[in-house]
Amino acid sequence: MHQYRGRLIVHTGSMFSGKTSSLEREIKRFQIAGYKTVAFKPKLDTRGEEQRISTHDNTHLNAVMCDNIDTIAEYIENNKVDVIGIDEVQFLEGDIQRILDQIDEFLRKKKTVVVAGLDMDFEANPFDLVKELMARADYLYKHHAVCTVCGADAWVSHRKSKDTNRIVIGASDEYEPLCRNCYNELLDTNANKSL
């Protein structure tokens, strides 16, 4: 696994696509290989228990709660860590360039960084941090959930409620994965209703 030292691994896609499960598998593989690992979970993600990253498949990974990249950097400075995992990376607070610079610093120090995060919000607008990380990744994995309407590969996490805030924490009660065609048909239907 030494070939991953100083590498950025990005798992992205819609909700329910297996991003967090993939992050968990990566971290556990590094643990088996004898690497010192740590996983971080932004405090904004209030789903499940604190100090644990939970997948939709009900598996768990112990995690350190964090607000921003500085919290992560402080932890790394004070602990021996080879592999850094960050779930729901789009929820990290702070300046995007500052986050990117700090991740680059981890990579220069031969740390492996594995992140999982949504590529787009419920209106199919990219999360800027994830967009930047995707471009910088050594390994990029785009995961797909199953569209709940037609069964095709999902493209976006459609919000079922009328809440218009960009960030609303939720799971299947709040979101459903849709393919591009079903999402666009839904938009067209809603637009016609409002006429």
Image (cartoon, grey):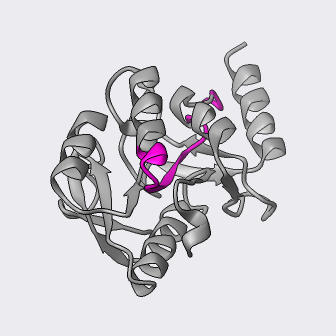
The picture places residue 165, in percent across and down from the top left corner, at 41, 25
In the rendered structure, the answer to whether residue 113 lies left or right of residue 148 reads left
**Residue bounds of the magenta highlight:** 106-125
Residue lying at the far top in this picture: please name it.
195
Q: Quadrant of residue 51?
A: bottom left
Q: Quadrant of residue 84?
A: bottom left
Is 12 a magenta residue?
A: no
Q: Residue at x 70, y 59 (%)?
A: 144
The residue closer to the viewer here, 127 or 32, is 32
Q: Residue at x 62, y 33 (%)?
A: 131
Residue at 48 percent of width and 37 percent of height: 104
Which is more toward the observer, 159 or 85? 85
Q: Quadrant of the N terminus?
A: bottom right
Q: Position of residue 138 (x, y in %)?
A: 66, 51
Query: Where's the C terminus, which quadrant?
Result: top right
Determine whether, in the image, residue 25 is placed left or right of residue 84: right
Q: Position of residue 6 (x, y in %)?
A: 52, 54
Residue depicted at x 49% and y 52%: 115
